[in-house]
Amino acid sequence: MVLYPRAVREPVVDMVGGVAVADPYRWLEGEGAEVEEWLAAQEELCAAQRARWPSHPFFRRVLAEAAGLGGVMTPVTSTPVLRGERRFFLSRGAGRELPAVMVADGTSPPRMLVDPLAFDPSGATVLDAFRPSWSGRLVAFQLSGGGQERPTLRVRDVETGREVGHAVDPGRPTPVAWLADDSGFFYVTGGAADPVRRVRLYRLDTTPGQGADTAPGEDEVVFETPFRQLSVTVSASGRWLSLTCAPGTQSGNMAYLADLSRTGPRAPDLSVVHDGREDGSQALVKFGPGDLVYAITSRAGEGARVCVVDPHARPQPHWTTVIDPRAGQVLSGCVMLADPASQGPVRFLVSLTEDGRGRLSLHDEAGAPLGEVPLPAAGPGTITRLTTVPGREDRAYFLYTDFLTPHTVFQYTLTDGRLSPYDSTAGEAAPVPGDDTDPWGGNSPTVHQVAYTTDQGIEVPMHLILPPGHEHGPRPTMLTAYGGFGGSASPGYSPTITAWVRAGGIYAIAGVRGGGEKGAAWHAAGRGMNKPNTFTDFDAAARWLCTQGLTTPAQLAIRGASHSGLVVATAITRNPHQYAAAVCSDALTDMIRYPHLGIGTWWTDEFGNPDNPRHLPTLLSYSPYHNTNPNTSYPAVLLTSPRHDPRVGAAHTRKLTAALQHATTSHPVLLRTEHDTGHGPRAATRLIDRQADALAFCATHTHLTPPNTDPPHTDHPA
């Protein structure tokens, strides 16, 4: 019998829009001694339960092996950033906890330039971003510690390795836009609670506070806005400055351009080139060869397209659509290429997804298709980080991955149309990956693309990864989905998927509404007042897996993190008997208090505002914390959260844990708390430990027995 730590239920009731909303565990939003005592007791309970998971050693071993080949959360390499003869890239070598910034001069061996472990050997400090100057002489980099997502921005001389200039606290991770002469860069300041965000000019040749109307110790402000989303870029020539800002993550944005060759960087004459506040449209301005200006744009509910921009046209810059993907295609990236040797016409290299498969196509300057670029594997696969090289725009680089293929850098060369693996370490084409990078040892699982139909008649895509030799069920199955902010659960190599399938389980990924699998309209169908559609699609995926004979409710586990964690928490409170186990990490669970926790105020465009009487009923209808009912047989649930989560707020996980432990009549409900980490990246060992706990917990409660592992014992009712 599981004895849970005592959690006092207090008579806290808020009147929200005339509705009485109970919040008995409001005290878990605090940081007092009673919260610390409760968290410590939860950690003891979780540690005691961990001893009941016989597959834990198997999963930890396989995860460590698989993570050595990389993954989204454990990268081992990156696309190169080329500056003259210098090459910058990320590398996480064998046995390393975190990636470091490497630099190579020409054909010289790479050397480590920025190592987070040199700042903090514990692995609690991570690299948020780095950006070399256009000459490659300097690099700006951001490190944050303890999961706080409040980095320190520093500048390092690449030749000497010494820091130069002054360190900056921007409040949150910031873009860095270098000036062409290396004299400084633009960056963004403003934390989550600040009423305004500002673009500042960092100068290496001056002391902060010397500019007009600038406080002592601060860099000059060149732009400010009350909008929360603010970004800045500068063209490689240093001529064009581009700013974009928006009130929310998914709302229409404004885009500005300034010609720095006319004004200099201290007083840019910014002109509005796009205003999407009324129609919800967004624009991302980019720069191509010869200072050509183009943009990726989208309107609310419509797919993205590529436009060429004439910034000199008056009274407004002229936009010409050149690439407008057909229905079913989703634009994911675009770069402009040209052969500097031949002075030939520009070309667009475009990455898209269609039917869950990444595609790469070449177009002429008017957008006419010139042909497909064959991808390195049959897929379904994903293309990310599509980029080109200033001054050498005859080539492009990107990362390719699929469920069976670890993330690999590829180089595309315009002159001969050749696509080849690229070794960022050696700075040259690499041989095609062989068996030493095959996580399956030549015995690969089967990947299926399927679709299922919801009760509303909506066809939803899903990927299935089945263990080799086990095409038929029922088998223990893990189901997940993202379903928010227009983000896609794209095909990609994952140590977690690898470990679960190698243990003999099926892994299923549903492309539910609210995500971006089918474009902007798919996102809109699961956003705001439509958010319940996300959960309806997820429930339908679970039922489909069972009706198809792939699994049963007694063998079905679900897991998710962040928005995906909200999907999981909602699933177990809506339909607890459909699932045997659930892992819910770093999730929103209190949809009435969410604007008061973390940076929740940034997300009202996605979820709605509980203070709006129109939105409140929808939020209350699915808020997991408010839909936890006493005397209910909930599945086994493992909730995980960092001790402090500046993005979501750790109180969400604590409050749902207490509510479920109070309500459940059967399986264990556990809380796993991580210290000195946050919502984002973490050291490899920390990630492996968390995922091993999640998989072993689910294996125990779905009766999945990996090879050479004792069967689990789950005869411990609450």
Image: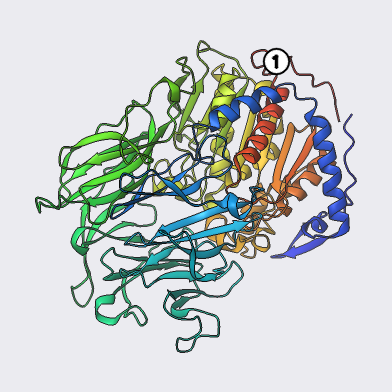
Q: Nearer the viewer, residue 77 or 318?
A: 77
Task: Identify the residue at the far bottom of this view.
Answer: 212
Neighbourhood count class around disc 1 (C-alpha, 10 Å): few under 14, some 14–19, many 20 upward: some
Query: How is the protein colored in the picture?
Result: rainbow
Residue 546 sits in which quadrant? Answer: top right
Point 80% across, 58% down: residue: 26
Q: Nearer the viewer, residue 507 or 550?
A: 507
In terms of secondary structure, where does tag 1 sit? loop
Observer able to see residue 580: no
| Horizontal arrangement in the rendering, residue 309 relative to residue 195 (left or right) | left
Q: Quadrant of the C terminus?
A: top right
Observer able to see residue 445: yes
Point 75% across, 25% down: residue: 53
Where residue 370 appears, as percent x and y from the top left, is: 15, 40
Where residue 86 appears, as percent x and y from the top left, is: 33, 52
Task: Identify the residue at the far top of this view.
Answer: 469
* Residue, disc 1: 709
| Horizontal arrangement in the rendering, residue 312 relative to residue 243 (left or right) | left
